[in-house]
Image (tube, rainbow, N blue to C red):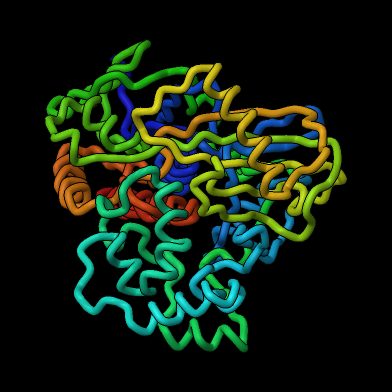
Amino acid sequence: MEKVKYLIVGAGVSGLAFANWLKSKDYLILESDSEIGGYCKTITQEGFTWDYSGHFFHFKNREIEEYLVSRMHGQEIRNVIKSSKIYWGGEWIDFPFQKNIHQLPKEDFIECVYDLVFRPTQEPLNFKEMLVSKFGRGIAEKFLIPYNEKLYATDLKELDLDAMGRFFPFADFEQIIQNFRNPNNSSYNDKFTYPAGGAIQYVNALASEVESGKISLSEKLQSVDVLNKIASTDARKIAYDHIISSVPLPGLLDICSVTYDHDDFSWNKVLVFNLGFDRKGPSGIHWIYFPQSQLSFYRVGFYDNIIPSNRMSLYVEIGLDRLTNLSETDVEALRARVLRDLKKSGIVSDHKLVCWHSTIMDPAYVHITKKSIKKVSLVKRMLVNHGVHTIGRYGGWTYCSIEDNILEARDLAASFNDIEFNHER
């Protein structure tokens, strides 16, 4: 039986970042896919460069950004000030909606202001009630509720009122009114960086610091004996001291034979279409939000407005219930509908589709509920007691940025480095 001190499960950003900052060289990275990167993979097709979805890095930590960029030799790095819009009434208004209600037609504007002033005063119990209590029924029902229902593909009453944490663009009454005269649409992702070669360049930067032979591709972790610390893959058995996993938490619990109530964990899928057209479309916009139920997608982004091109390059995202089972025929039918909806919303006219790609992200957005918060805390403590550390958005079953994943992995590696240093002393 093989033996390794640190068994890292998943060669995405979290797993590779942990290996980068771990001082010990006694580690092995298992990756079930044939390529590294997880959801940060990049596809190139007929001159178009697409990611699995829109992955733009919003760095707050300058040190992390410099660490990655310094390892992207020869890459053009674009520093972008975000321009995002909302499709409303056949027009594009500024995001976030709640700060820009003055851009709505008069009657919609009056309704939003009135409901903002006379919003409910009772304490909210879930995400949907939070939206109404913070912003009033008009703002909530015109954008915040329908948009997030499309994104999460669920009833928002099921989500915890703080399901999006710091990533939700809150604004108090005074800020909303001030925005009528002095626009300030700042949010956590005002600026982002993007390499010309796509999001995979960030992954490659991390992978450049991993020793040759330390990543085993196309090897799937099948079971873990947490009592005896033995991991079984589809190829071998590995004794370990610690597991660091970015596997989605419910899947990891199954692998570790941990009994749990499956109703404690919920999520949705996202079907992503990457579309390349023969000529340019709208300029100066990086992505647009669509709350309308009659349109299939909730967001459309423009790669060609980030890396300049004379051809329109889009990513289109559709939220789906996790139980949705798509066949090739379903995907083809949805692609045809997407093209019709892009035309309805004025993004394409007589454009010719040159090529396309699709992928399904499953899970995509985890549903943070009161039950999941309690269960995640419980099972993570239990796993740590057996040397299993679960990290990342899906491993931690949370809502966070890619930078957050890197910082979490770095901090966990640092804690092991400290233990080993003190042990050597």
In the image, what residue occupies the spot 61% across and 41% down? 316
Quarter the C terminus occupies: bottom left
Between 35 and 357, the one nearer to me in the picture: 357
Instruction: State the image coordinates of residue 375 (x, y, percent, origin top left).
Output: 16, 46
Relative to 306, is 389 above or below? above
Taking 238 as reference, is 337 left or right? right
In the image, what residue occupies the spot 46% across and 51% down? 406
Instruction: State the image coordinates of residue 358 (x, y, percent, origin top left).
Output: 60, 29
Taking 244 as reference, is 47 left or right? right
Instruction: State the image coordinates of residue 344 (x, y, percent, origin top left).
Output: 68, 45
Instruction: Judge whether residue 47 can be spotted in this image.
Output: yes
Instruction: Judge whether residue 23 can be spotted in this image.
Output: no
In the image, what residue occupies the spot 34% across and 74% down? 134
Q: Quadrant of residue 125?
A: bottom left
Taking 266 as reference, is 136 left or right? right
Quick one: which residue is furthest to the front in this view?
107
Q: Quadrant of residue 26?
A: top left
Relative to 100, is 332 above or below? above
Relative to 249, is 381 above or below? below
Between 57 and 270, the one nearer to me in the picture: 270
Q: Quadrant of residue 18?
A: top left
Between 225 and 343, the one nearer to me in the picture: 343
Taking 111 as reference, is 341 left or right? right
Q: How many marks?
A: 0
In the image, what residue occupies the spot 49% across and 23% down? 33
Instruction: State the image coordinates of residue 212 (x, y, percent, origin top left).
Output: 56, 28
Quarter the N terminus occupies: top left
